[in-house]
Image (tube, rainbow, N blue to C red):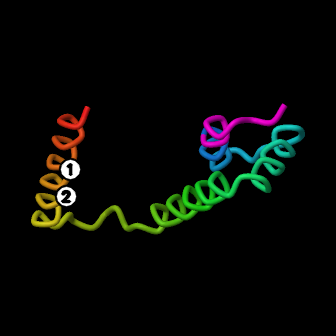
């Protein structure tokens, strides 16, 4: 039985740390060939991981950017709470 999309999302994350082998690899490969959404999600996860790994985390954080991100997060979080 092939994994569903939720299981594929979990496998995509696990696959970043440890390569899949055997039947898990084959089932993932077949699902990816049939599901463009999971394929795109997997590509995005890989790209995000590569992007984060290239960041220089020793650089100081710009306080204006930090405040803007926090403000945007709060605004989006409040909208989510209201819409539920």
Query: Mark 1 highlights which residue?
Result: 73
Q: Quadrant of residue 66?
A: bottom left
* Residue 36 spot, x, y in % from top left: 68, 58
- Please tell me which residue is depicted at 79% across the width and 56% down the height of the picture: 33
Indicate whether 72 appears above or below 8: below
- Binning the other alpha carbons within 10 Å of mark 2 as few (below 14), some (14 to 19) or many (20 upward) gives few
- Please tell me which residue is depicted at 75% across the width and 47% down the height of the picture: 19
Indicate whether 84 appears above or below 30: above
* Residue 28 spot, x, y in % from top left: 78, 45
- Please tell me which residue is depicted at 48% across the width and 66% down the height of the picture: 51
Q: Secondary structure at mark 1?
A: helix
Number of marks: 2
Which residue ends up furthest to the front in the rendered image?
A: 83
Query: Mark 2 highlights which residue?
Result: 69
Q: Is residue 60 left or right of residue 5?
A: left
Indicate whether 11 appears above or below 44: above
Indicate whether 61 appears above or below 79: below
Q: Quadrant of residue 13?
A: top right
Res 11 label: none
Return the residue nearer the eye: 53 or 39: 39
* Residue 50 part of the magenta segment: no
CA separation in Å, label 1 and label 2: 6 Å
Q: Is residue 45 left or right of residue 74?
A: right
Q: Quadrant of the C terminus?
A: top left
* Residue 75 spot, x, y in % from top left: 15, 49
* Residue 2 part of the magenta segment: yes
Q: Which residues are magenta?
A: 1-9
Callout 1 touching callout 2 (CB < 8 Å):
yes
């Amino acid at each position: 039985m092939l994994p569903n999309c939720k299981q594929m999302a979990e496998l995509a994350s696990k696959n970043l740390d440890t390569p899949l082998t055997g039947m898990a690899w084959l089932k993932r490969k077949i699902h990816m060939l049939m599901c463009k959404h999971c394929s795109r999600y997997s590509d995005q996860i890989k790209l995000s991981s590569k992007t984060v790994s290239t960041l220089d985390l020793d650089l100081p954080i710009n306080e204006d950017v930090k405040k803007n991100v926090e403000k945007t997060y709060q605004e989006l979080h409040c909208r989510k709470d209201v819409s539920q």
